[in-house]
Amino acid sequence: MLTTQNRAKLKSIATNLKDLVFIGKDGLTDNVIDQINDNLFAHELIKIKVQRSVSDEIKSLALEIEEKCEAEVVSIIGNKILVYKYTDKPKFNHLI
């Protein structure tokens, strides 16, 4: 569970991040989930961009990502979702 201070720190780090995962018109497919998990393992914090062609609401997508990836949504701003998950990657410089 992220504290308010942790969320603030992660949001400040995220200002310099590029979108790593894109959710297109097919929505949250197994391939997208795999891509999210791989990027979370490598980086701990990622930005996901939801294309305008997606019919699902962004909040429901964020909840689904939390459940399927066992991660935490830090924030939702516009069409972008910021997601964090602690990584077990060896010799990784953890964000929080």
Image (tube, helix red, strand yellow):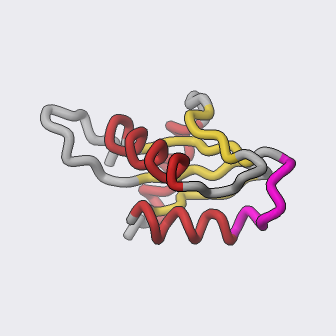
Above/below status of 90 relative to 23: above
- Residue 27 position (above or below residue 23): below
Residues shaded magenta: 52-59
Q: Nearer the viewer, residue 11 or 54?
A: 54
The chief SS type of the magenta part is loop
Return the residue found at the far left. 90
Q: Is residue 89 left or right of residue 40?
A: left
**Does the magenta portion include 46?**
no
Q: Is residue 48 above or below residue 64?
A: above
* Left or right relative to 67: residue 27: right
Residue sitting at x 58%, y 71%: 63
Q: Residue at x 53, y 62 (%)?
A: 65
Query: Residue 48, percent across and down?
Result: 61, 45
- Using the image as rendered, state which of residue 88 and residue 69 is in the foreground: 69
Q: Which residue is rendered at x = 78% and y = 45% of the image? A: 51
Left or right: 31, with 15 as reference point: left
The percent coordinates of residue 49 (x first, y second) are: 69, 43
Quarter in which the N terminus is drawn: bottom left
To which quarter of the image does residue 85 belong? bottom left
Expressed as whole percent of the image width and height from the top left, the position of residue 27 reads: 69, 56
Between 6 and 66, the residue placed more toward the observer is 66
